[in-house]
């Protein structure tokens, strides 16, 4: 892709000029959206990102969330960590509304700012050249990763008791790279699709790197866990007999990238803080659209499928199908997909010889893999529950600090891990996995439902122990059977933190 360094700074509330859309390049933009509704709102200054536009359909293909951020303070520009979210690390007391002071032409911008504006893409490009060869990951093709205990674990990668936390430690934090490469190679997809090993390795490294390691839950370990669960579902007889190699490739790639570049906050938070992603995607499936476009951006940047013939449009079709799978993980579409799945099962008309029906089955498999943590053994399930709840609570702490309305499930003073998980299991997880067991009535499905029942009983037991303490809890506190009044809507927000209840957030648009 040709990079155009001289493109202007474009605020997101203005339409992109046609002469800009006609050029394939990168647009550096600033955001002046206010965070508060006060008369004198504080604003983020110097926020810039990169949008890649495709002149054929004039849609944004890829956005680097906060690829380069500089905050204006009393002493100058202070760099922020690349993988952090703006509202998680910036002290808003140090921000100044200086965007309006230099909103004129580029020639009026002070020299230092012009240098940053014109050098951002060069900086991003040069840093990307070095990515893929981090110190902790040698560039040879995984030969030495298949040794010792990690190799022994990979031999049992199809086990539902697979401990992804142990595997991540054994691979020195490279569980997503190692696991995904192993599965692609085990299915023979590397040879079948003639994937370049270096390009594949670079793609996987960049995918893992684009997961924010400081997120308690939405990080590369979660992506690796979903990928492993997806592999278990792909091996089920109901799917394995019908899926094509292309279906398997898309399923594994979608699982590995389904939460790519997740900021650690949910969709309502992005909407009420006027985040530029919410503006770009019109408050509809904001995070899922970003995950999809980010994955497409990495596929194109690494050229993983560049060797495939362009005339048959197979690459574009794969990108669209990848997006359709990732968009299906939007929790706001849970009832829509579940109702459609139940109808197919009732009418017994799910024909996996049809490409459309196979793709729908893959969507349901990915939805199950994304929220399968309550169906894991207790030791694993409990760790995931604590991690996702801590991520919710961290968001709630930020909302309290900045006088914002606290999102459902994000107030640590009003919720516990137990009552969140019990509501999530009852209203979100159990209905989905009951229907999945009807579709694939195997030992794995019964094992998952068994773990779900045991884990729900364990959380109820812990809730009873807490409520039996020396001091009585206040009304509304979570007891053994107590659920919040809005538990149905709140439980939806627990499903990966992707969004709030359907009454608060508009339903996502139909998948591409």
Image (tube, grey):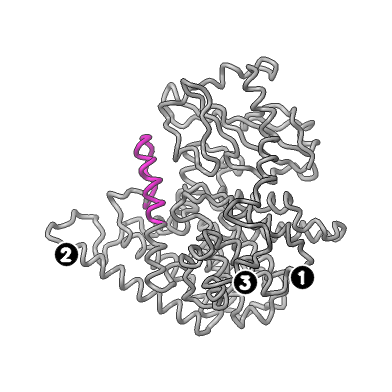
Quadrant of the image containing the N terminus: top right
Determine whether the residue tagged by mark 2 lies in a helix, strand or loop: loop
- The residue wearing badge 3 is 361
Badge nearest the viewer, 2 or 3? 2
Badge nearest the viewer, 2 or 1? 1
Vertical arrangement, residue 85 with respect to residue 438, above or below: above
Vertical arrangement, residue 128 with respect to residue 422, above or below: above
Report if the CB atoms under discs 3 and 1 are less than 8 Å apart. Answer: no
What residue lies at 63% left-to-right and 52% top-to-bottom?
A: 206
The span picked out in magenta is 388-409
- The residue wearing badge 1 is 191
Return the disc, 2 or 3, that comes first in the chain's sequence.
3
Determine whether the residue tagged by mark 1 lies in a helix, strand or loop: helix
- The residue wearing badge 2 is 468
Q: How far across and how far down the image is residue 280, in percent?
A: 61, 40
| 482 sits left or right of 357 in the view | left
Label 2, label 1: how far apart the Cα atoms are: 60 Å
Badge 1: residue crowd in 10 Å (few <14, some 14–19, many ≥20): few
Q: Main secondary structure of the magenta part?
A: helix
Label 2, label 3: how far apart the Cα atoms are: 45 Å
Q: Nearer the viewer, residue 416 or 163?
A: 163
Label 3, label 1: how far apart the Cα atoms are: 26 Å
Report if the CB atoms under discs 2 and 3 are less than 8 Å apart. Answer: no
Quadrant of the image containing the C terminus: bottom right
Q: How far across and how far down the image is residue 224, in percent?
A: 55, 63
């Amino acid at each position: 892709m040709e990079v155009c360094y001289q493109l202007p700074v474009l605020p997101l509330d203005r339409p992109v000029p046609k002469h800009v859309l006609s050029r394939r390049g990168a647009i550096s933009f600033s955001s002046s959206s206010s965070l508060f509704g006060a008369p004198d709102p504080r604003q983020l200054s110097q926020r810039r990102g990169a949008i890649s536009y495709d002149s054929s359909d004039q849609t944004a293909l890829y956005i680097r969330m906060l690829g380069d951020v500089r905050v204006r303070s009393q002493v100058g520009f202070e760099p922020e960590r690349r993988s952090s979210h703006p509202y998680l690390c910036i002290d808003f007391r140090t921000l100044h509304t200086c965007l309006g002071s230099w909103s004129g032409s580029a020639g009026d911008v002070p020299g230092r700012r012009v240098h940053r504006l014109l050098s951002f893409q060069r900086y991003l490009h040069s840093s990307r050249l070095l990515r893929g060869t981090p110190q902790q990951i040698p560039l040879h093709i995984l030969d030495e990763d298949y040794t010792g205990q990690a190799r022994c674990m990979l031999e049992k990668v199809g086990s539902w008791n697979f401990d992804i936390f142990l595997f991540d430690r054994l691979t020195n934090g490279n569980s997503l790279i190692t696991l995904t490469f192993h599965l692609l190679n085990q299915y023979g997809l590397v040879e079948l699709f003639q994937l370049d090993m270096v390009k594949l390795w670079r793609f996987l490294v960049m995918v893992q790197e684009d997961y924010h390691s400081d997120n308690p839950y939405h990080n590369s370990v979660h992506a690796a866990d979903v990928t492993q669960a997806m592999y278990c579902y792909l091996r089920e007889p109901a799917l394995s007999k019908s899926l094509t190699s292309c279906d398997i490739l898309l399923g594994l790639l979608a699982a590995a990238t389904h939460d790519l570049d997740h900021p650690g906050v949910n969709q309502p938070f992005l909407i009420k803080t006027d985040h530029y992603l919410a503006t770009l995607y019109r408050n509809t499936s904001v995070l899922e659209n970003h995950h999809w476009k980010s994955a497409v951006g990495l596929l194109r940047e690494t050229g993983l499928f560049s060797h495939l013939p362009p005339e048959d449009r197979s690459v574009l079709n794969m990108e669209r199908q990848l997006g359709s799978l990732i968009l299906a993980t939007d929790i706001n579409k849970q009832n829509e997909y579940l109702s459609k799945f139940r109808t197919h099962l009732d009418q017994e008309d799910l024909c996996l010889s049809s490409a459309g029906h196979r793709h729908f089955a893959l969507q349901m498999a990915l939805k199950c893999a994304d929220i399968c943590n309550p169906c894991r053994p207790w030791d694993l399930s409990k760790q995931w529950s604590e991690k996702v709840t801590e991520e919710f609570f961290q968001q709630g702490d930020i909302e309290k600090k900045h006088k914002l309305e606290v999102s459902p499930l994000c107030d640590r003073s009003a919720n516990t891990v137990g009552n969140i998980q019990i509501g999530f299991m009852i209203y979100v997880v159990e209905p989905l996995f009951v229907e999945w067991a009807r579709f694939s009535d195997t030992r794995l499905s019964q094992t998952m439902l068994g773990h779900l029942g045991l884990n729900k009983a364990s959380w109820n037991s812990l809730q009873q122990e807490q409520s039996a303490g020396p001091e009585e809890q206040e009304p509304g506190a979570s007891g053994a059977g107590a659920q919040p009044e809005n538990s149905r809507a709140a439980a939806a927000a627990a499903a990966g933190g992707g969004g709030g209840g359907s009454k608060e957030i508009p339903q996502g648009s139909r998948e591409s």
